[in-house]
Amino acid sequence: MGMTILSGGFLTTVQDAGRVGYQQYGVPVSGVMDPRSFAIANILVGNEKDEAALEITMMGPAVTFDEANVIAVTGGNLSPALNGSPMPMYRAVAVKPGDKLTFGMQVSGCRAYLAVAGGFDIAPVMGSRSTYLKAQIGGVEGRKLGKEDRLAFRAPKTDLPNLTQGRFVPPEDFTATHKTLRVVMGPQDDAFTEKGIKTFLSTTYSVTNQFDRMGCRLEGEVVEHIKGGDIISDGISMGAVQIPSAGQPIIMLADRQTTGGYTKIANVITADFPLIAQCKFGDTVRFKAVTVTEAQDIYLSNLRRLEAIRTDLDLVRATPGPWEFTVNVNGTDYRCRVKPR
């Protein structure tokens, strides 16, 4: 079958890379908040990096496995435990029927990702398995997971290359409570005074408790507009930093609306989405401007890193010795056995 949810935790949803191609009809992209942790979880279990996984926010669920498979947990450290013992993160782990996965104290970060080999057997809606809670689209009936929900595995596996030797990558560190978010300025940065731009790029802002999958409101020194924060509505991308007339930034995230009527001073670069996704209430951020070319180079570097991780994990390592050879000496064959020291 797959696995059964014993408790859903604070907010556990099915998410993938998002619902692409429907913003013109007013349908948000949704998808994961931390795309890097999500991709690594999938690579660890041998999936394509955009396969649907569970996004677990702050307080994790409890699940039992009804079928053998290989799983991995990445992202923020929410103290995962398998059958009561700490479960290593950023490592592919084989589970069997009856095993129980739980989550405990929030140690670092805000969101963890649980991927299963072969993915979940959930029908896509508009090309995506992502859950958009406000419109109840996708995932499991468009809602967060709760007690007695059952998720079937689509193509479970009991083995993967290098599983027994250790299929893992070094965990990412989300313990820092202050982060620098790199941004590309625009598209309405000309709506701000020189002082406003300087304020935006030099102020430390605090993450408020108005932080969900739609956006993250920040609090700090007011960013000064030339005439005000209202514009004719236009499209909003993931990471867009809106500044309404009150002068406090709002970073738009996965479940953002498709259009908005506030000035956007900058956009957080894709490579830094994980940093804001793993922020918590009270954490602080600053903004640092980079060029479009720099943002693209960083993005491509991250893509190459993900591919390198996959290549390394899937590389079938040579079996360590001993090795046997036949050596002929003066017409006589000798069988030699060599083993590493």
Image (spheres, grey):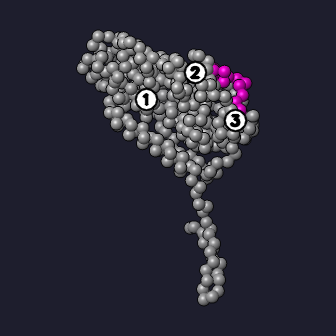
Q: As drawn, which residue projects farthest toward the left?
A: 194
Question: Residue drawn 70% across and 45% down?
Answer: 158
The amino acid type, in three-letter code, at marker 2 is: Tyr
Q: Quadrant of the N terminus?
A: top right
Between the residue at mark 2 and the residue at mark 1, the CA separation in whole angstroms equals 28 Å
The kind of secondary structure element at disc 2 is: loop
Estimate the x, y position of residue 50 in percent, counting from the top left: 56, 35
Which of 341/236 is in front? 236
Residue at image point 65% right, 40% down: 117
Question: Which residue is depicted at the point 37% across and 35% down?
Answer: 295
Q: Is residue 316 above or below residue 252?
A: below
Q: Is residue 174 magenta?
A: no
Write down the residue under mark 1. 177
The label shown at residue 132 is 2
Q: Is residue 142 magenta?
A: yes
Q: Which sits earlier in the primary sequence, circle 2 or circle 1?
A: 2
